[in-house]
Amino acid sequence: MNSLEIKDVLGVAEPATKVIEIISNAIGTLYEPRKIRKRADAEAYRIKKITTAAKESNFNGNIELFDGKITISGNDNNLEEIKAIISSEVRRLYNEKENIMKIADYAYDELENDKSIIKEEIDNDWIKNFLDTGRKIYRDDLQFVFGKILAGEIKNPGKYSKRLFNVLSNLSQEEAELFNKISNFVLRKGNNSFIIANTEILNNFEITLDQIILLEEAGLINSDSLNMKCNVVEYKDYLVNFNNDNPKLDVYFLTKCGSELEMIINNKINLDYLVKIKQRYNIKEMDYSIIKSKEVVGDKITYSSYDFKNID
């Protein structure tokens, strides 16, 4: 079913249509988002997959489907073993399908009301890698992140690297929670994302070097402290201006995957963090404002912002 037919049937906007198209191709049947689908009959799906898996194996017995039930019989000496293998394979296939559909539901929720026109297709290799990894993601928090990644990639192909999938799939619960915590303190300058590496500042927010090293091992941040001069940084949706000062900040840089993941996490700014930076680096004046618009031309970034507020 092509995207035009899907749109006609379900009446969804262009980006959301793309979610349905990609997932439908992946699961072999029309994917209906959680908000508009009737709950699938899990038993019927299970029976269908048992039949298919058995027929594709070297099993020489008989498979009969009658009145919603399946019977497997034959003279094979390993009949019980074959039944167990087929049942195990069906459970795996069903669970992987459910994982993909949960990820798709999050992506659909993100794009449901988006009216953007999709002008560029996602790379097929990217989709394959995404789906191969997504099938094995069982944690709801990571399924949410994968949904955000799919939505972002549909709107802006090439936004997320395939390496990010592998990093996320190996992320422990502890590492995920720790990165979520540290993301509250990530600043950005151009293409660089970082947190202040000053021990005194980090201790105020219960962030330790051991935690930084743990996230380094997870592929999200570098534990080598470096210096960077800047007079303006981005902090979430805000522009932070150091005015006439140009402090040399001690920083831990996030990796590319860490930077991509941080952009997905929607944390709020911590004004006390900015106050600590101002005090530690003897910045005379510091203010912040919501970024209204941002234009990037080469290495030059031009901001439009409003309602500046001083940080005392």
Image: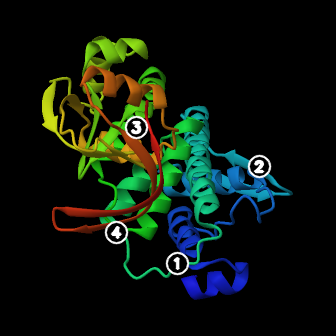
Mark 3: amino acid: Ser
Viewer-nearest residue: 89 or 67: 89
Q: Nearer the viewer, mark 2 or mark 4?
A: 4
Q: Residue 13 at what x, y percent from top left?
A: 62, 78
Q: Earlier in the sequence, mark 2 or mark 4?
A: 2
Look at mark 2 in the image and give the residue it sits on: 43
Question: Circle 1 sits in a helix, a strand or a loop, which is it?
Answer: loop
- Quadrant housing the N terminus: bottom right
Callout 3–callout 2 Cβ contact below 8 Å: no
Callout 4–callout 3 Cβ contact below 8 Å: no
The answer to whether residue 72 is left or right of residue 84 is: right
Q: Residues within 10 Å of mark 3 (few under 14, many from 20)?
A: some
Q: Earlier in the sequence, mark 3 or mark 2?
A: 2
Task: Measure how far apart labels 2 and 1 are at the Cα level.
Answer: 38 Å
Q: Nearer the viewer, mark 3 or mark 2?
A: 3
The answer to whether residue 152 is left or right of residue 66 is: left
Relative to 138, residue 176 above or below: above
Quadrant of residue 91 within the rendered picture: top right
Mark 2: amino acid: Glu
For residue 124, which numbered disc appears in the image? 4
